[in-house]
Image (cartoon, rainbow, N blue to C red):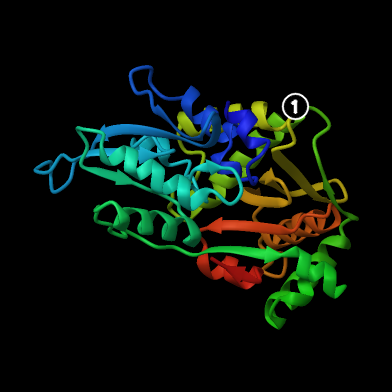
Amino acid sequence: AWRALEGTAPSHFFRGWTWLGTLLEHLPDDHRPDVLRVSQGQTTIALALVWQRRQRRHRGLLRPRALHLNESGIADFDRVTIEHNGLLCVPGAEAAAVAAALRHLRLRPAWDELELGGLTTPQHQAWHTAASGCGLGFRERWTKPYFFIDLQAARLAGKDYLEALGPNTRYQARRSMRLYAQQGALVCERPESLAQALDWLERLAALHQAQWQARGHAGAFATAYTRHFHQRLVETGWPRGEVDLLHVRAGERTLGYVYNFVAGDVTYNYQSGHVAESDPKLKAGLACHCMAVDDALRRGMATYDLLMGGEHFKASLTTGRG
């Protein structure tokens, strides 16, 4: 049913079954979600997963019974971080579907709060309006920006991606790529098989962990769960064209790897790993990013979404935010 609805709904990777089905596979057997279905007549127009879990707040003095939309409510599992969350819904029906979902949940007993993580502004407004309409309070816990590049605007202007950036970022990127080109031709390539895609994921994770641990942080692949989750995500999504792994090299020297998701004409940059350089003029991460964006531009993608986090770095490399 989920895959069938994906065929008629706007493309959202994090609301698709490749992401949510992989999450479901890795959760304990005693922690299963309900499926929330909104229908119009006999036609399913929206779907979501709803997990219930007790939370612990104020040193355990408060233990609210929380519902979670498309997240498990267990921090160690949800650290893979859903973004652009919401109902998987047919075009034009989201506001009505959200209102119907909340009216239904309003009548469901034995819960205290519904947690909605990773909503973008339009989804936030739809849930806020629906909550007000059925007498529920709404509290915003945190807000973070996400960053994107409007590739269609660059394409229509007849410019390359770097032309849209500030002069300092543009200068550093071009200098770095020029210096790398002296080591060998810059190449951005895709795996030729699932086995190679999984190998590149392992290499990306090793580079990613090295750079984050050097800064005193755990990194996105720090636990056995996150490594297994992403391995399974690649196994499921790469053959479907929903997961993209890129290898960027200068001649035969690896500069790094980029791990992206693809839904419709949007590329989501999820993680990357790159070599460390002693020369500050050589910026492997910047070069990998530029090569990946140029690749998306050539493939006709409309948006390159860098998602949340790394605010200063991402702000300098993008043309918009949400």
Q: Secondary structure at mark 1?
A: helix
Picture coordinates of residue 263 (x, y %)? Answer: 68, 44
Residue on which the image places disc 1? 194
Regarding residue 176, the answer to whether it shows in the image is: no
Examine the rendering and report whether any part of residue 194 can be seen: yes
Placement of 128 over or under 315, stated as above or below: above
User: What residue lies at 40% left-to-right and 43% top-to-bottom?
Assistant: 100
312 lies left or right of 163: left
Q: Quadrant of the N terminus?
A: top right
- Residue at image x 69%, y 80%? 166
Residue at 75% x, 58% y: name it.
302
Asked if residue 81 lies left or right of residue 74, the reply is right
| 63 lies above or below 318 | above
Q: Which corner quadrant of the image does residue 103 belong to?
A: top left
Q: Position of residue 209 (x, y in %)?
A: 54, 44
Residue 105 locus on image (x, y percent): 31, 38
Which one is in front, 163 or 214? 163
> Does residue 72 sit above or below 145 in this rendering?
above
Residue farthest toward the left in the current orientation of the protein: 61
The extreme top residue here reads 29
Figure disc tally = 1
Return the x and y of residue 248 as percentages of the image width and height: 78, 49
In the figure, is residue 270 to the left or right of 140? right
At label 1, the amino acid type is Leu
Image vertical order of residue 60 relative to residue 289, above or below? above
